[in-house]
Amino acid sequence: EVQLLESGGGLVQPGGSLRLSCTASGFTFSTYGMSWVRQAPGKGLEWVSGINGGGENTYYGDSVKGRFTISRDNSKNTLYLQMNSLRVGDTAVYYCAKRSRLPDAGPFDIWGQGTMVTVST
Amino acid sequence: DIQMTQSPSTLSASVGDRVTITCRASQSIRSWLAWYQQKPGKAPKLLIYKASSLEGGVPSRFSGSESGTEFTLAISSLQPDDIATYYCQQYNSYPLTFGGGTKVEIK
């Protein structure tokens, strides 16, 4: 079964850091682009960051550029999001999502269940 | 960045009604447009890709169409299970962008 499982969410103070992980199974992880998408409480979906299958190309939304870093370890079938200088506005459910077409194209056909990140004092 | 403008933000209709949701891109995205359905507390689910292609397992009452930079999701006969929020997304280029969402309710 194709599956994505996020972990690493939690409560952190403003200015703090957190690393999210997303473990993939059921498909050849290294050949697909992956992204992080977040959803603030009661709000819509916001694309955060993306990475191609080999990890050479990374992309960021303006709201997280310079603070977040996306990476992947294909030997462990795992996607990461390192989040630094966290702000209250980063509070959201964070989803990892798989792109449907090789090498880094198509919509998101598989999503994880999400992990909650709360930035608060 | 490509802006996706989705309307309406909420929609109330009766079971059996035909409903339509519109999404407009700020520039050409060719046909690289997807529609997702999200139910409360759940991850989004892909319904339509490449503007009008139905994802496997999605009921045929869902359909997509396009006209230039305007895209439409239609539900031919609204069912109680269709109560959800729907999002469009362009995947023509980074940064990938979503529409603001349309919440569909039963009247």
Image (tube, coloured by chain):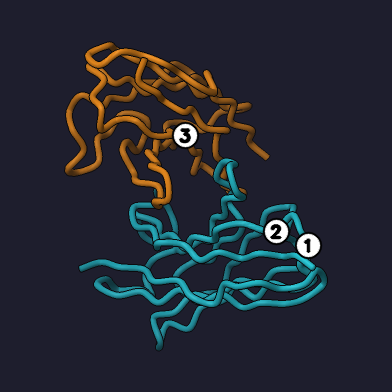
Chain colours: A cyan, B orange
Report in which chain the residue with disc 2 lies.
Answer: A
Q: Are marks 3 and 1 on the same chain?
A: no
Query: Which residue position holds label 2?
Result: A90
Q: Residue B29: x percent and y percent?
A: 52, 33
Residue at 66% x, 72% y: name it.
Answer: A11
Q: Which of the numbered marks, if any, corresponds to residue B90? A: none
| Foreground pick, A37 / B83 | B83
Query: Which residue position holds label 3?
Result: B88
Element under label 2? helix
Q: Residue B56: x percent and y percent?
A: 19, 44
Task: Give, as a three-letter code, the residue at label 2.
Answer: Asp
Crowd around label 3: few <14 · some 14–19 · many ≥20 (10 Å): many
**3 vs 1, front mark:** 1
* Quadrant of the rendered image containing residue A22: bottom left
Task: Give, as a three-letter code, the residue at label 1.
Answer: Arg
Q: Residue A36: x percent and y percent?
A: 54, 61
Mark 1–mark 2 CB contact (< 8 Å): yes
* Quadrant of the rendered image containing residue B38: top left
Mark 2–mark 3 CB contact (< 8 Å): no
Query: Which residue position holds label 1?
Result: A87
Element under label 1? loop
For marks 2 and 3, give the CA distance.
22 Å
